[in-house]
Image (cartoon, helix red, strand yellow):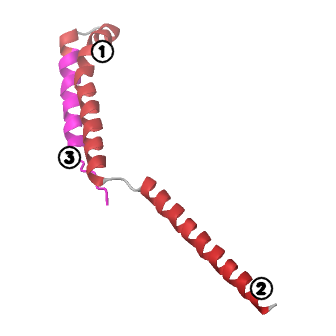
Amino acid sequence: MPSTSGATFNQARTAHEVAKAQKARIQVDRLKEEVVDRARATALVFKLARQERDSWITWPARVAGQMAAEIGIDPHVMQTLLEAHVHAHLDELAAIEPNFR
């Protein structure tokens, strides 16, 4: 009988080691999915910020006429005011630097 229990212990120890290795592999795989490449993230944030900025820059021209008509002022005056305020706000936002640490 001693040989049977020895084999059982060795089988159990082997199964335990295999399970630990599988668990470690799964944890590494999960970490790989959660890790973000900093250069890629920075490039994506820059691209998205530029798209948003470009959208805001063209916004006054799209809405100035309608807004001016709603309040009864000259559309050119409205567009000029909107552009000034949008550009000032974008300048404030441009000063924000993302920190990925």
Element under disc 3 = loop
The alpha-carbon separation of the residues under discs 2 and 3 comes to: 73 Å
Majority secondary structure in the magenta region: helix
Residue 95 image label: 3
Mark 2 against mark 3, which lies toward the viewer? 2
Q: Find residue 31 and report its horizontal and vertical position in percent.
A: 45, 60
Residue 100 in magenta?
Answer: yes
Q: Which residue is mark 1?
A: 63
Q: Residue at the right extreme? A: 1
Element under disc 1 = helix
- Which of the two labelled residues, at mark 1 and mark 2, occupies the earlier sequence position? 2
Q: Find residue 27 and report its horizontal and vertical position in percent.
A: 51, 63
Q: Which residue is mark 2?
A: 4
Image position of 47 (left or right of 5): left
Q: Find residue 40 and report its horizontal and vertical position in percent.
A: 29, 47
The magenta segment is 78-101
Mark 1 against mark 2, which lies toward the viewer? 2
Q: Amino acid at mark 1?
A: Val
Q: Amino acid at mark 2?
A: Thr
